Image (tube, coloured by chain):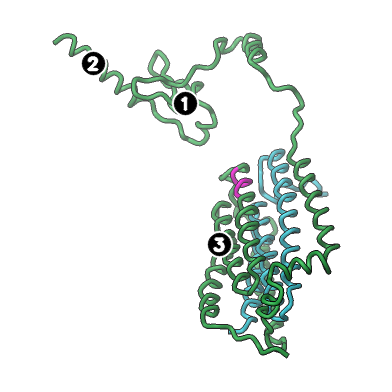
């Protein structure tokens, strides 16, 4: 087995995450799709670190985790605020800015 | 030049067992009807990703993945699912016509593009991290990088985390427009409206059962809708009081028969 298999897996997971973001209407599941894409990118970073024999990829993966957790906190708070005012977690209902 | 990395049979087996499971779980995120099921399949994907990190000679990042992602972040997701409600399921109506077909095409195109591009890359063989990890140790090596070359990113991410924490508190905060009604205000309102002067009827109390989901019976034997919470009525979790009332009648009848004996 070659290490490139991890990269293929990461590409497949990233594409599935993108499909989740585009297809699902529930804001929480859309958010999980974003998390899936970030995880796929992290897997690629970790594999690159092993390919090149340098720890930099692992450090970048750690920073991606930091950014992802900050994003999750703010995003879920926004979902909660929208749900509180509109009683819905569907992303199609939040069209207040529509012309 | 170091010797190229040999990947053992154990890791090969691990990959070919866990990779299909993680792809299936990721597809579960795409097809699950309920958000709780989607969250559970997301946890599976994250745990397997953590195992892959550890297999890829990144033990520290792998354990952080399991603790932070599948522990804290997914707990947060489940918490929000709980608050937003389990019935917040998806509608299956397409808002933009042809969007679903276009998404499938784009996704397949992305997979094909990435696979072809990755397949055409030539590289000089994997080096592996065994030498680096034994030289300094994985955690120490990461610490040298985080507090050395990437210390500026580290500071900025600290700033980002504080901003995110404050932002979530501001977004989740709700200011009360009016003070909450106390018992005196409720009583004054009841008398002003002239309805339910003694308060709403209490839920039914029977010989063998008293619970808030059992409605009270009115003197004519009909059910009092006002005695159960309308939340329970909306969830259709209201119990029928007939059998408790029947049981009570039976007990009274037996007592009567016993006294005549």
Residue B4 percent coordinates (x, y): 66, 88
Q: Which color has been applied to chain B in this rendered view?
A: green
Residue B44 is labelled as: 3
Q: Are marks 1 and 3 on the same chain?
A: yes
Residue A85 percent coordinates (x, y): 72, 38
Say which of B125 and B223 sits in front: B125
Q: Which color has been applied to chain A in this rendered view?
A: cyan
Mark 1 secondary-structure assignment? loop
Give the residues in magenta: B78-82
Residue B212 is labelled as: 1
Say which of B221 and B131 sits in front: B131
Q: CA distance from mark 1 to mark 2?
A: 27 Å
Q: Are marks 1 and 3 in contact (CB under 8 Å)?
A: no
Q: Residues within 10 Å of mark 2 (few under 14, many from 20)?
A: few
Say which of B118 and B245 sits in front: B118
Against A32, is A99 above or below?
Answer: above
Q: Which residue is mark 2?
A: B253
Quarter of the figure with the N terminus of chain B:
bottom right
């Amino acid at each position: 087995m070659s290490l490139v298999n991890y990269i293929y897996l990461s590409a497949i997971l990233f594409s599935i995450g993108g499909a989740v973001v585009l297809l699902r209407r529930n804001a929480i599941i859309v958010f999980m799709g974003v998390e899936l894409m970030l995880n796929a990118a992290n897997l690629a970073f970790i594999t690159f670190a092993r390919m090149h024999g340098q720890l930099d990829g692992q450090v970048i993966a750690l920073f991606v985790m930091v950014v992802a957790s900050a994003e999750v906190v703010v995003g879920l708070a926004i979902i909660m605020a929208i749900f509180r005012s509109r009683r819905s977690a569907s992303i199609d209902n939040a069209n207040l800015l529509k012309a | 030049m170091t010797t190229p990395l040999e990947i053992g049979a154990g890791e090969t087996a691990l990959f070919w067992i866990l990779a299909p499971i993680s792809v299936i779980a990721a597809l579960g995120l795409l097809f699950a009807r309920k958000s709780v099921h989607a969250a559970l399949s997301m946890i599976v994907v994250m745990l397997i990703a953590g195992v892959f990190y550890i297999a890829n000679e990144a033990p520290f990042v792998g354990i952080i993945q399991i603790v932070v992602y599948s522990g804290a972040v997914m707990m947060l997701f489940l918490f929000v699912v709980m608050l937003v409600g389990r019935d917040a399921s998806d509608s299956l109506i397409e808002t933009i016509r042809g969007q679903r077909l276009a998404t499938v095409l784009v996704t397949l195109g992305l997979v094909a593009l990435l696979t072809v591009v990755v397949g055409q890359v030539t590289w000089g063989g994997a080096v592996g991290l065994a030498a680096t990890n034994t030289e300094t140790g994985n955690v120490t090596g990461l610490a040298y990088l985080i507090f050395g070359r990437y210390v500026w990113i580290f500071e900025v991410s600290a700033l980002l985390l504080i901003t995110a924490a404050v932002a979530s508190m501001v977004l989740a905060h709700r200011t009360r427009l009016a003070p909450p009604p106390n018992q005196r205000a409720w009583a004054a309102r009841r008398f002003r409206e002239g309805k339910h002067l003694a308060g709403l009827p209490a839920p039914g109390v029977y010989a063998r059962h008293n619970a808030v989901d059992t409605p009270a019976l009115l003197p004519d034997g009909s059910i009092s809708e006002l005695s159960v919470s309308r939340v329970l009525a909306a969830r259709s979790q209201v119990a029928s009081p007939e059998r408790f009332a029947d049981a009570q009648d039976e007990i009274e009848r037996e007592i009567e028969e016993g006294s005549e004996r």
